[in-house]
Structure formats: C-alpha cells, structure tokens
Amino acid sequence: MSGLEAISAHNGWMMAVFGGSIVFSGLVILSIAITFFPKILALLDKNDATAPVKKKPANGKPAVSTTLSDYCPSDMPAVVRAYKPLIDQLEASFELTELYALARKHQLPHPHLTIKCFREAGILNPQGEGRFNWNP
Amino acid sequence: MDLLTNFVQNTGYFKLFEDFRFLIMIIVGITFVYLAITRQYEPLLLLPIGFGMVVGNIPFFRGFGIGIYEQGSVFNYLYFGVTTGLYPSLVFLGLGAMTDFSSLLARPKLMLLGAAAQMGVFGTLLGALFLGFAPKEAASIAIIGGADGPTSIFLTAKLAPHLIGPIAIAAYSYMALIPVIQPPIMRLLTTRKERVIHMPDPREVSKKELMVFPVAGILICCLLASTALPLLGPLFLGNLLKVSGVTERLAGTARTAIVDTATIILGFCVGASTQADVFLTIHSIKIFCLGAVAFSVATASGVIFAKIMNIFLKEKINPLLGAAGVSAVPGSAREVHLVGQKADPTNYLLMHAMACNSSGVIGSAIAAGVLWSFMLGAT
C-alpha cells in the first residue's frame, strides 16, 4: 500500500500531528522551567543567606554564631567542594600561601577572598606557626 | 587441480568479479575514507564507517563465522552493541559530558528552534508512508531528519533492524554534508537584513543553574516521553558529571575514552553492516532520497519558525539560528556561524547556535522516543 491511502491507513496524519506536538510541548515546558531557574535559585539563596552560619567548636571553645561577610559566596558547600581536590594535594597542616598558589594555578576565582571566607566560616583552622588545617 | 580451482573460486577476487556490487561498496567506502582524510568531512565518523564498509564488503567463505550477520563471529558480537542500542547510549553519555548548556540556559527561548527543526522528522514520516514503507520502517527513516546518527541508529535498531545500514549511512552522510546542504537553504529563506541581526551577549549562568538543568531536564522530558530514557538518561548524567565539579575524573572518562571507544566501534560496525547484497537495494535509494528531504525540511522548519518568532518578539533573533535546531553537533552551529559571518564579519552567532544545537539533541531524542512509543503496537 502506498500514497495518501497508506498514510491514512497507518494513522500517519495523527502520528505526525501528535508527535510534533509532544516534542514541541516537551521543549516548551523545559524552556519555561529554565526561565524560572534563576528566580527559584535566588529565592533559595536568600533563605540560605538569612540563616546564620555556625562555627564548629574547636578545642573545647564555645561555638560562635556568626554571619559571613557580604563578599563570601552564598553557596559555601559548593565552594568547599571545589577546593577539596586542592586540599587533597596538600599535607594535613599547610600554609595559606600554598593553598592560594594552588587555587591560582587552577584558576579558581577570587582565591584570596575565598580563603578569607573559609577562615571566617571556621573551615580553615589555625594550628599555630602560620599553619592551618581543613575542617569543613 | 580441483583443490586449486576451488580455492581460486572462493577467493575474494573471484567473488568481486562474480558480484560487482561488492566492488561498488568498497569504492564507496574508500571514497568516505578519502573525504574524511583529505576534505576532513566529519572524519571522526566517516573514517571508521568508510573503513568498515571496505571490511564488510570483502567477500568471504559463508558459514565460517566471519561476517557481521553470522552468529558467533567477532563482528557479530561487536554488532550486538548496535542492535541493542548500547553504543548510541554511550555516545550520548559522552556527548552530555562534552556539552555546555550555559548558552541554552541563558536564552531558553532558543530551545523552541530545536523543537521546530524536529518537524522535518514528522514530515518525513508522512513521506515514507506515502512511498509505501511499513510504519516501523517509516519511523526509522523519519528520524534521519533529526540529523543525529546515534539517535537514528538507536531507533532503527529498535524498530527496523534490517535498515540499520542504509539509515545510518544516510544520517552520517548528511551530517558530513552539512556545509553543502544547509547554507543554500539558509540563504534562500532569509534576507541579508535578517542574516546581519546581531544577538546580544548571553547572561552569565550560575553553576547552580547548570547543575539543576540535567535533573530538571530528565524529569520533564522523560516523564513526557519515557521511551527517550535510553538516550536522554546518559546525556543528562554525562552533563551532571561535568557540571557537578565533584566527578571531574568520571566526566573526563565519559567525554574521552568512552565516547571515543563507542564512536570507533559504532562507526566500524555500521560501515561493516553495509554488505552489498543487503545494502544495495531500491529501498536504500529511497531512504537516501527521503533522508535528504528530511534534513532539508528540518533545516527549513527551524529557519521559518525563527522568522515567525520574530513577528512576536521585540528583541529579534537571527533566523539563521533556526538551521542549528537540528542536532548535528557542532556542524550545523558552525555552519550558521559561517553564513552569519559572510553577511557581517562582526557577527558572532556560534554561542547562540550551540544553544539551538543542544536543544536539537534533546528534541531529536524525544522525537525518537515518541516514534518508538507510537510503534509499540504497529507491525
């Protein structure tokens, strides 16, 4: 069988119309969802930013509740994950200049400010003699 | 003497003279290899396919377990990955690990152009049914319009495995011929004024958005068309491996070792599957003609849809971008950029065209899933 008769017999018209519509709807829904990504994420970030960041008690000292500086990244866990491979290359106790040099080498953005934020968040803890350890 | 005569009659040389179709296919294979090396037409695809065509068309003793269609042969084991759709899935994993969706996330409306280009698929479905192909064969031929080799192979393996050779060769040939097929259609459907439209720089996309996209993408697309899972699942997984920042080693393996291995074996097997006695039929010629129509209609649909969008948009988009809605990554995006630059050398469309290209990949996988689900009850 061939010709228009074959198209009708095999539901060709319906398949073409519905198939096209389904593909189109799928991508339209996805594009609409993408449009809302920044708004939803900004809303979540806002909630995160208002929550205080707790310092872990170190050496029996009392925990200090503090808010990170404005210039610190809103998504600290993500930044911590990005720095983890660098930390793995260092010894357990290291100097901040070593971490800074590695961050520069891997072209991570704003390493100076990020390291400062790690210190504020208690992720980098002083061990004395200018050396620090990593305790996320 | 009889022994010698038997031996001579069983050599490939003798059989080549006996059935010249094998010789034709060997010449086609060598031409593919030549084009890949000298003209660099999609060399990563054409070279393994072309060499596979040469290998697959060397006549051999039947029953010795040598040929790709003979049970238990080495080639048959390799071909298993084609007929089950394994290699296309692996290619999609690597593709996901290579793709940067940030330009698409920055301008989501460009995703509609990827959807519009899929109209070529459904237009060709009608054409194939019109020419008398069975529904499953017609669906397999139609997906050539998606301009995506692995997707075409995947769907054909599921619906019409006997057509894998001609459909795969047609899909990859047209992908290689993008610089020949697409520019005339783009120029025909656009004015110079439209071709010089500059696109504004895309906004910066946050890492979080990039990480949310693969998860949202798989949920939205595959809840709608779950049959697209074998392609979109690996695609979005590969992308998540890339953007998460915690699995760089896995992403690196996916975009190098895995995709390279899958591409080599897939290309070789598809080439070797074009044995002249199976491949050189009137069906193959029809498939090649329909493939050309599918690819042209897909290109034209994207461009025309972009022009329609411009009627409603305040900030006009360059209609050339519609041609990149087919999923031939990155060939069609590169061609859109070049045609745009010919009209205005200061116009850089590559990033925007890549957005359409990425959505074309997703769109063609959904189209394949939809066609597969339509054919579940068909004969």
Image: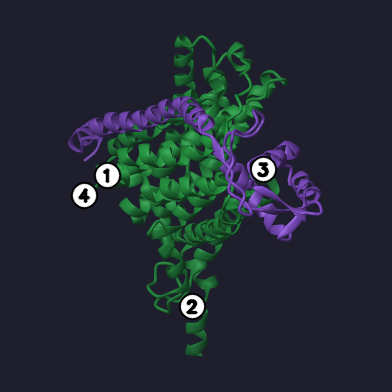
**Residue B170 seen in the figure:** no
Q: Provide the secondary structure element on which disc 3 rests.
A: helix
Chain B representation colour? green
How many marks do you count on the picture?
Answer: 4
Which dot marks residue A81? none
Contact, mark 2 vs mark 4 (Cβ under 8 Å):
no
- The chain ID associated with circle 3 is A
Q: Residues within 10 Å of mark 1 (few under 14, many from 20)?
A: some
C-alpha gap between disc 2 and disc 1:
48 Å
> Nearer the observer, disc 3 or disc 1?
3
Q: Provide the secondary structure element on which disc 2 rests.
A: helix
- The chain ID associated with circle 4 is B
Chain coloured purple: A
Same subunit, tags 2 and 4 = yes
Residue A133 lies in what quarter of the image?
bottom right
Q: Disc 4 designates what residue?
A: B379
Same subunit, tags 4 and 1 = yes
- The chain ID associated with circle 2 is B
Q: Disc 1 designates what residue?
A: B373
Q: Disc 2 designates what residue?
A: B9
Residue B242 at x, y percent in the picture: 57, 47
Residue B227 at x, y percent in the picture: 32, 46
Residue B352 at x, y percent in the picture: 58, 27
Left or right of B97 on screen, residue A20: left
> Nearer the observer, disc 4 or disc 3?
3
Q: For this rendering, which residue is in front, B137 or B61? A: B137
Left or right of A7 on screen, residue B57: right
Residue B177 at x, y percent in the picture: 57, 39
Q: Residues within 10 Å of mark 2 (few under 14, many from 20)?
A: few
Residue B297 lies in what quarter of the image?
top left
C-alpha gap between disc 4 and disc 3:
64 Å
**Residue B71 seen in the figure:** yes
